[in-house]
């Protein structure tokens, strides 16, 4: 893990060179890093909660009396609300201590899990998922913006990388474990488990996070200035397409594995665990190449994603073929978030917080629109059709990436225009 974080740190230092300012220099190094760990636990809890329904979709749909496509709203709803809360919180939180906001968001996460676990019907379930969305967008914008303030300036990139490992561990451990718990007890027990995880994150942040006074607030004019740049608009379109490609299909991967490929629930747990593990390895591997050619790295990963999504419906009769393509999918998406995040930061070097808010917002829009569109396709055309949809969106994303040209030496200059 340390090697992975160090590699990401080195790439971030060389690629981004963004200004950071630590505000906790008076704290001991150990306490500073423990505060980073507390935020990373929060990231683990948030991402596990966000994507937990992916592994539980058939059981929840059956118990709450809705179709699999309708059940996909459990992923769509928090995405829509998070897309709004990401910039809205940064616009409205200029005078509030960041520590207090992070604690409030963790309380909302805990409430979301408890409401979802006890939901008597699908409407209550969506209420719990809406609370998650309200907390999610703000958490990610603040977590990325404040990570550099928790440690000394020279360690800022490593702190950010450590927080992002919470995402990796959620993919590798959190979602598969939630699916496994549902096979032993029920999907409600899975939400209770993530509620316990949220409580641990809240306690860790309450004990370890230092005071984080407001330094500056994003203004509407900052967001407008970024959106006025053609390269930003094109970059956001690329991010929307590639994340939409992933989530229009990934939301329904469990029903596909059950209905089309004939996998048992324990086997699905293993497949999802493999998806997360290869994604973890891929994230480390891409960090060694992304500094040499960011655009080619991103293009290659999106191309692998496209091939995997288009091939899965054709290979449904072969479980070995399906597993191979799911693992290829995991390799691709394990690397894509890091590449896309660096791409957007290179596009907004003068307004990094505003760029971060737009990135979080567009990703959540892509999750919401991708999963909801996938649900419509599933209900009307069947599960394999949503994989074809994902493949088509990935192809469109490749076209946008290629439109920037492949002159790596001038990519940063091109993106910042």
Image: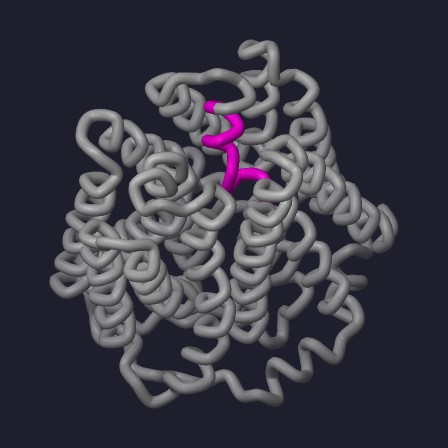
**Which quadrant would residue 317 be assigned to in this image?**
top right
Q: Residue at x 31, y 32 (%)?
A: 179
Residue 33 in sight from this viewpoint: no
Count how many numbered circles sit on residues in the image: 0
Q: Taking 217 as reference, is 186 left or right? A: left
Relative to residue 242, is residue 4 depicted above or below?
Answer: above
Q: Residue at x 44, y 22 (%)?
A: 271
x then y, percent, for residue 240? 65, 57
Q: Residue at x 76, y 63 (%)?
A: 234
Tell me, yes or no, whether the highlighted magenta stretch contains residue 56.
no
Is 51 in front, or is 171?
Answer: 51
The quadrant in which the C terminus is found is bottom right
Magenta span of residues: 248-258
- The color scheme shown is one colour
Farthest residue, direction front: 65
Q: Residue at x 59, y 63 (%)?
A: 362
Relative to residue 305, is residue 210 depicted above or below?
Answer: below
Q: Taking 164 as reference, is 251 left or right? A: right
x then y, percent, for residue 66? 41, 47
Relative to residue 376, is residue 230 depicted above or below?
Answer: below
x then y, percent, for residue 264? 39, 17
Residue 186 in sight from this viewpoint: yes
């Amino acid at each position: 893990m340390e090697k992975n974080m160090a590699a990401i740190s080195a790439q971030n230092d060389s690629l981004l060179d963004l200004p950071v300012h630590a505000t906790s220099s008076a704290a001991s190094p150990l306490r500073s890093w423990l505060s980073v760990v507390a935020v990373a636990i929060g990231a683990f809890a948030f991402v596990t909660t966000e994507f937990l329904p992916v592994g539980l979709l058939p059981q929840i749909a059956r118990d709450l009396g809705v179709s699999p496509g309708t059940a996909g709203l459990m992923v769509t709803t928090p995405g829509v609300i998070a897309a709004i809360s990401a910039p809205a919180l940064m616009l409205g939180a200029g005078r509030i201590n960041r520590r207090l906001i992070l604690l409030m968001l963790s309380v909302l996460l805990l409430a979301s899990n408890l409401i979802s676990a006890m939901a008597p019907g699908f409407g209550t379930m969506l209420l719990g998922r809406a609370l998650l969305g309200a907390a999610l967008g703000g958490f990610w914008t603040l977590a990325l913006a404040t990570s550099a303030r928790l440690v000394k300036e020279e360690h800022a990139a490593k702190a950010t990388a450590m927080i992002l490992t919470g995402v990796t561990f959620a993919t590798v451990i959190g979602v598969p474990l939630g699916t496994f718990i549902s096979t032993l007890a029920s999907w409600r027990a899975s939400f209770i488990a993530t509620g316990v995880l949220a409580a641990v994150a809240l306690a860790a942040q309450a004990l370890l996070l230092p005071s984080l006074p407001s330094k500056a607030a994003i203004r509407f004019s900052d967001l407008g200035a970024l959106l006025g740049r053609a390269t930003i608009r094109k970059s956001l379109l690329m991010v929307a397409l590639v994340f939409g490609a992933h989530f229009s299909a990934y939301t329904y991967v469990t029903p596909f594995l059950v209905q089309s490929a004939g996998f048992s629930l324990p086997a699905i747990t293993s497949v999802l665990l493999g998806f997360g593990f290869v994604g973890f390895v891929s994230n480390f591997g891409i960090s060694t190449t992304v500094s040499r050619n960011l655009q080619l790295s991103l293009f290659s990963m999106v191309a692998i994603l496209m091939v995997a999504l288009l091939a899965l419906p054709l290979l449904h009769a072969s479980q070995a073929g399906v597993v191979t393509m799911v693992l290829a999918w995991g390799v691709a998406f394990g690397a894509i978030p890091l590449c896309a995040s660096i791409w957007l930061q290179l596009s907004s070097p003068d307004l990094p917080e505003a760029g971060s808010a737009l990135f979080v917002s567009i990703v959540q829009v892509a999750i919401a629109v991708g999963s909801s569109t996938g649900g419509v396709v599933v209900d009307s055309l069947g599960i394999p059709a949503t994989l074809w949809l994902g493949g088509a969106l990935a192809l469109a994303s490749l076209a946008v990436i290629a439109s920037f040209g492949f002159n790596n030496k001038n990519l940063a200059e091109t993106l910042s225009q």
